[in-house]
Image: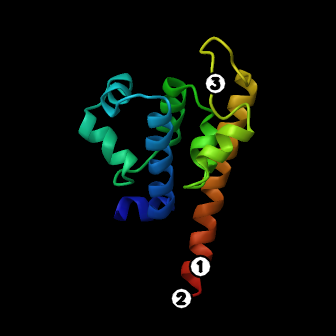
Amino acid sequence: MKEAEESGFTVLENKNIGRNLATFRKLRDKKALEVAEYLGVKEATYTKYERGESKITIELIQKVAEFLKVDPLQIVSAHPGHVIEHLTSSNVAIQTNSTFQTYSEKQQDMMLQLISEVLELNKALKKVLEGKK
């Protein structure tokens, strides 16, 4: 928990993203073990990500999104309880055909850059809020 706080990546966000990982995995009818094997980690290690107990990195999000054929931005931005809405109202939330790509490599790079910038903004906001205490 201390490591997460030092990185500026709050536990709440970690838990939300973890829940999204679990939700998208279940929607894809995949077992945690399958995702863990794809990532090259133990199932227990992966399930800690889903529970928000381990720090979730951009690289992890990207790899899970690739395996589940989900837009990585959806994993980061979907709000708990609204994932189904995202899936039914957006044709880019989950790909239905594994050979069809809804975004280009350039767009993916831009999304990852955006995620990085959001994380940096989160760090800056945390510093400002800590300064007011």
Task: Name the residue beneath numbered marker 3.
Answer: 95
In the figure, 121 relative to 104: above or below? below
Going 28% across and 40% down the picture, which residue do you hit? 45
Q: Quadrant of residue 73?
A: top right
- Tag 2: amino acid: Lys
In the figure, 27 relative to 77: above or below? above
Between marks 3 and 2 in the image, the one whose residue lies nearer the viewer: 3
Task: Name the residue beneath numbered marker 2.
Answer: 133
Task: Name the residue beneath numbered marker 1.
Answer: 129
Left or right: 44, with 116 as reference point: left
Query: How far across and down, in percent of the image, does residue 37 sit?
Result: 32, 24
Marks 3 and 1, how far apart in space? 39 Å
- Tag 1: amino acid: Leu
Q: Secondary structure at mark 1?
A: helix
Going 61% across and 52% down the picture, which residue do you hit? 82
Q: Secondary structure at mark 3?
A: loop
Query: How far across and down, in percent of the image, does residue 58 sit?
Result: 53, 41
